[in-house]
């Protein structure tokens, strides 16, 4: 592992995200033995936590950007009944 904060550099990369997905899954209740093995490795646990924090910050920024967008005017909004009928294949021809 790179001596920096993340797997290959000091900045988060696609490699970190790919590895994180696998390692994070091993920390769940579905894999108790693997969770224990990862917890026994402080550097690995710290790495997983760093990637988790870094990606959470990006997700938060995206959520704030979505929330800041101007909503559609009512005249352009699609009625929810129409959306439901199309989604369930109930739209009339």
Image: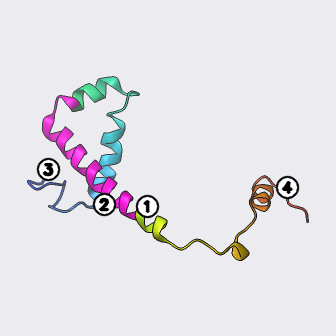
N-terminal of the pair, mark 3 or mark 1, is 3
Q: Between disc 1 and disc 4, whose residue precedes?
A: 1
Label 2, secondary structure: give it.
helix
Of the two numbered discs 3 and 1 in the rendering, the one whose residue sits closer to the viewer: 1
Residue at the spot 70% in from the left edge and 72% down from the top edge: 74
Residue for badge 4: 90
Across and down, in percent, residue 57 comes to 31, 57
In this view, the residue farthest toward the right is 93
- According to the picture, the residue beneath numbered tag 3 turns out to be 1
Q: Residue 14: give its label.
A: 2
Q: Which residue is mark 1?
A: 63
Residue shown at 46% from the left, 69% from the top = 68
What is the C-alpha distance between the residues marked 1 and 4? 32 Å
Q: Give whichever of 5, 76 is nearer the camera.
A: 76
Is residue 93 part of the magenta span, yes or no? no
Question: What residue range appears in magenta?
Answer: 39-63
Question: How far is mark 3 from mark 4, CA to CA?
Answer: 54 Å
Q: In terms of secondary structure, where does tag 1 sit?
A: helix
Location of residue 20 with respect to 68 vertically, above or below? above
Q: Earlier in the sequence, mark 2 or mark 4?
A: 2
């Amino acid at each position: 592992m790179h001596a920096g904060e993340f797997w290959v550099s000091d900045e988060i990369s696609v490699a970190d995200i790919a590895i994180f997905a696998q390692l994070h899954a091993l920390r769940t209740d579905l894999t108790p033995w693997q969770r224990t093995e990862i917890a026994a490795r402080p550097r690995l646990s710290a790495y997983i936590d760093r990637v988790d924090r870094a990606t959470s910050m990006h997700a938060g920024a995206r959520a704030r950007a979505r929330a800041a967008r101007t909503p559609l005017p009512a005249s352009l909004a699609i009625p929810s009944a129409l959306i439901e009928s199309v989604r369930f294949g109930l739209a009339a021809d």
